[in-house]
Amino acid sequence: MTQGKKLFVRDATGLVRELSTTDTFVWTIVNVPLLLSYVNMVFWVTSSGLLNVDYVITTLIWMVGGGIVIMLYYAMAGAMPRAGGDYAWGTRALHPAIGFVMSWSFVWINILSEATGSYGGVAYLSSGLSIAGKMSSDPGLQAFAATLTQQNSELAIGIAILLFAALAGSFGKKLLKTVIYFIFFVGLIGLLVAFGLLISATREAYIASFNGISGLPYEQVMAEARTAGYMPIATIAASLSAVPYAVLTLGPHNVASFLGGEVKSPKRSFLYGMVGAWAFSAVVWLLAFALLDSTIGMRFIEAMTFLSTSKPDVYAQTGMPAATANLFMSVITKNPLIVHLVTFGVFVGNMGWMIILFPVNARIFFAWAFDRVAPLKFAEVSDRYGTPVYSVLLMAIASIGAFIVIYFYPALFTFNIALLLSVWYGLSGVTAIALPYRRKDIFENSPLKMRIGGVPVLSILGVAALLIYIYIAYAALNNPSLGPISASALSWTAILVLAALVLFYAIRALRKSQGIDFDAIFREIPPE
């Protein structure tokens, strides 16, 4: 124990295990919102020019792949439930520098996602209000929607969203829980309303409603798309090509693992809160795609998107706004209240994952500081709120700073986030492979410590996860719609990863000069 006092900042983290199994489930769902996620997937895929996708097949494939990854995180989080998640495991099971690179990649993914997500939130809100204004013949609402995307408004709203997320994450888990549960239930209501609309309408009724407001009838849209080169069929090849988009929009649901030091009954909570949330979400998404296809028609959604990008002059004849989820859903009903509910559900869902990422990144900063990898100030926990307030503040400064830089100088932030994500998850797979052999003391505490033919199941999951993310890295390097693949973008991405190694070894040298046995820190399991 004397050595532990010397190595770590203090004997206990100061964090309290107060997140229940239900909390873990709700936080997980809010981080990958049910309504927003499948909307993002469909319209990212179609806008990228990838057509003829059977979304049920794509989702089923990723249910298996994502299931592998989430089981891996369940096993490792259950074995060592600590703040920082795979930073804590990677630094102990692989190498301290590699674990730091993993977490550094994830931190930057989150910071850049927060920055770009602010734009997304404003865009969702503006689009939804604009369509509601058109459907209800309310020019005032349409004009207000247009003002949201003007430069000053967009900047102010984006910063306001990030400040709200920072404040929610700073003043204790009681406030944070209240905000997250509110977002969960609003998102759930929006999802149920959307499902209710899709279930209550027939394809014939949808076509009749669309024909009543569009300058081009439903069947003529399909005919124009075919004339322009679109073939309204689903293919296995296209469905397989859409899998990387599913990976980047549908999970996996591992966010609770980064709050491991604050989760009660970790093994049970991670099983039902992470694995259970993944299974629940997968069922919801499969139902969503089936309903969209039954009521609206996925080929029709593809045809509309295809015309809007390939034949804008033809699409203009519909007299419709941009081909978004709000547009297709609002055709079913002219009730502006219902349209607003769906719009608000999507907007709040976008807020939800952004709010969740603040405490997640803050716990990584906290874990770095607790291991003396970052300034010790970030390991301080507020006596009043029980949160690492300085770490949350750092996240706020970083995300707002990134947002402002991207806003005014977008060329400076040309990182390939899909590639960074592959580095992070790929190294997590390597950690799972190594953990049973390099840290048997940690592995023996895992809820998934069985073996097949003498080989740990966790290592098998690690190999599978590594292969999955090698494929995603390959896709990221060859598909510009997944992320920029210019020499500049790839260079900046590589520099970001290399910077983690330089920073780590600089800190190591500093701590050694201070007389601290830096390497010994990572031979120990952090205290709770």
Image: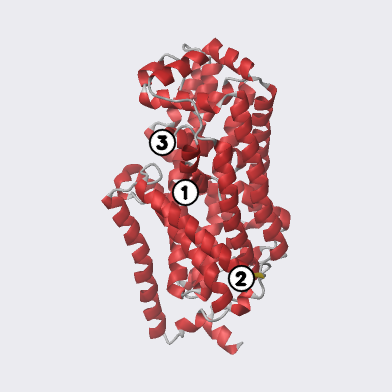
Quadrant hosting residue 119: top left
CA–CA distance in space, label 1 to label 2: 37 Å
First-in-chain label (2 vs 3): 3
Question: Distance from label 2 to label 3 (Cα)?
Answer: 40 Å
Amino acid carrying mark 1 in the image: Glu
Are the residues flagged by discs 2 and 3 in contact, CB closer than 8 Å? no
Q: Earlier in the sequence, mark 1 or mark 3?
A: 3
Q: Quadrant of the C terminus?
A: bottom right
Element type at mark 1: helix
Instruction: State the SS at label 3.
Output: loop
Residue 373, percent from left and from top: 45, 73
Q: Relative to 433, does residue 26 appear above or below in the rendering?
A: above
Residue at point 42%, 25% (across, down): 230
Q: Tell me where residue 387 sits by quadrant.
A: bottom right
Instruction: Kindly check if marks 1 and 2 are in contact, taking CB atoms under 8 A apart as contact.
Output: no
x%, y% of residue 40? 51, 38
Residue that numbered label 2 is attached to: 456
Q: Secondary structure at mark 2?
A: strand
Q: Position of residue 217 (x, y in %)?
A: 50, 12
- Please state if 387 lies on the left or on the right of 98 as rendered: right
Q: Of discs 1 and 2, which sits in the foreground?
A: 2
Name the kind of residue labelled 2 in the image: Pro
Check disc 3 and give the amino acid type.
Answer: Ser
**Is 291 on the left-hand or right-hand side of 109?**
right
Tag shown at residue 208 = none
* Res 48 label: 3
**Picture residue at 59% right of the left edge, 33% below the top:** 344
Residue at the spot 31% in from the left edge and 51% down from the top edge = 489
Q: Earlier in the sequence, mark 1 or mark 2?
A: 1
Viewer-proximal residue among 337 and 214:
214
- Tag 1 residue: 114
